[in-house]
Amino acid sequence: MRFLNKFLAYQTNNFIIVKIQKKIRKIFNVYFVPTNIQKLPKNNYTTSSHFDHQEEIIKKFNKINNLVSFNTCPKIVQMLKMLFLDENLKFNFLDFGGENIDFYLYLKKNFKNINYFVHNKKNINQDFIRLKEKYKFENITILKNIDEISNNKYDFICFGSVIQYVENYNQILLKIIKVSKKYIFFSGTHFFSKIFNEKKRIIVRQVNFLPSEIYCYFFNFDSFMEIFITNKFSIIFKEKNTIGKVNYNNFGSSLGNVIYTDLLLSL
């Protein structure tokens, strides 16, 4: 597997090599390969959402009255209803990394008193601002920069398979902990059980989108949890995410158990 990992991690614009990489990835069902880089590249995981695309999502949502775009935790409404039993309760929901407008529409449909806050990259934020103005959406606040997150307190903070793509994730988590009133949820996050070469995290290349150059973190679970335990958070549940069928076999036993995880924490 070592040669396979190195070959798939190799970056090139050569059409023939990329084509071979894609075929090998499919044969061995590989999603991620280890790298030796120490930081996530700049402009990693660029988002290409456009206003027209968001409007198409609105049209489809109005037809089916349900989520349109892919979501790593489609059962989040059921979870929220268990946590917030009073349907008339007002609560603040922060969607960190929210990318598509149907998630807001879906939550608003089920919780009439939800205050929805969202933060993403500049182009996504601008799309949300335009949508809010054009469609007169209520109870939605677009946080245009990281500092604006601290302007509010949140009952539920959602990281939908996003924290592993954030270079300064530790600073983000410190900020989030300060504004969390109760729950923090991570869906579709990669956790491993063993400390690997004294590393609390590793950077991998995501190869199921070749030739796109996408990198993300795998976290040692115990190390990741240290900041939350210190701040008196406890685990409500930790379970395997069943939406993403991720294969980690090419890592062997070097990381121990690697699990694509949903994790709910609470104060």
Image: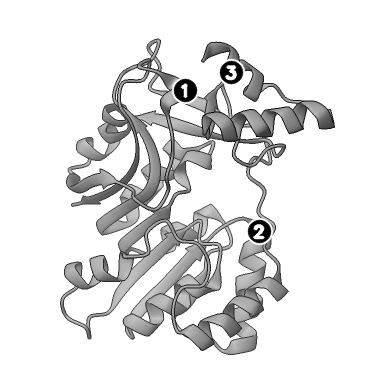
Q: Nearer the viewer, mark 2 or mark 1?
A: 1
Upstream in the sequence, badge 3 or badge 2?
3
Mark linked to residue 4: 3
Q: Secondary structure at mark 1?
A: helix
| Residue kind at label 1, given as amino acid type | Asn
Which residue: 39% across, 81% down?
Answer: 108
Q: Secondary structure at mark 3?
A: helix
- The residue to which callout 2 is attached is 122
In screen coordinates, is 232 left or right of 117? left
Q: Residues within 10 Å of mark 1 (few under 14, many from 20)?
A: some
| Residue kind at label 2, given as amino acid type | Lys
Which residue: 24% across, 65% down?
Answer: 79
| Residue kind at label 3, given as amino acid type | Leu
Rendered view: 107 above or below 100: below
Q: Position of residue 195 (x, y in %)?
A: 33, 17
Quadrant assignment, res 158: bottom left
Rendered view: 182 above or below 69: above
Which residue: 66% across, 68% down?
Answer: 126
